Image (cartoon, rainbow, N blue to C red):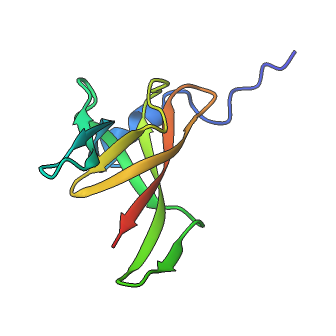
Amino acid sequence: MNNAPPLVHPDLLASLGAVGYFPSLCAIQLVVETQDAAGQPIEVGVGIPGKEAMPCRVAHAPSGDNEVRRDANTVETVTHDVCLQGHYPEIVPKNRVVVGLDTYDILAVKNDSTERRTVLRCQELIV
């Protein structure tokens, strides 16, 4: 039987918020389809109660950037990881996350095995 102490103290992730590891606040939104003034379908984000000011950290993901040239413009997609303090199994890829003025589509949700943090792999669309 292994009685060795764990490599990481179980309260480490909880204490990181106090030292600025999660410097931003984010809101998780439900994406719903509606119509614009011309009757065209558009997607809008609607805030989810209890998920409006969640501590987070945004980091540029190491890969996944892509630039596509179109007739009228160039579109660049940039991939980010948004790390949330806590376990949120109810967040799904159909949601969006808003951090400051930036809005990201959630591509994947990863929860750690200790249920102490959630990482959202996201994509930002820049036109």
Residue drawn where x is 47% and y is 58% of the image = 80
Q: Is residue 33 above or below residue 79?
A: above
User: 89 and 4: which one is in front?
Assistant: 89
Image-quadrant location for residue 55: top left
x, y percentage for residue 93?
A: 49, 39
Whether residue 53 is visible here, answered yes or no, is no
Instruction: State which quarter of the image contains the C terminus.
Output: bottom left
Please indicate whether residue 65 sits to the left or right of residue 32 in the image.
Answer: right
User: 123 and 57: which one is in front?
Assistant: 123
x, y percentage for residue 82?
A: 43, 49
Q: Is residue 42 above or below residue 61?
A: above
Please indicate whether residue 10 sits to the left or right of residue 17 in the image.
Answer: right
Residue drawn where x is 21% and y is 58% of the image = 101
Image-quadrant location for residue 110: top right
Q: Is residue 67 above or below residue 125?
A: below
Instruction: State which quarter of the image contains the N terminus.
Output: top right
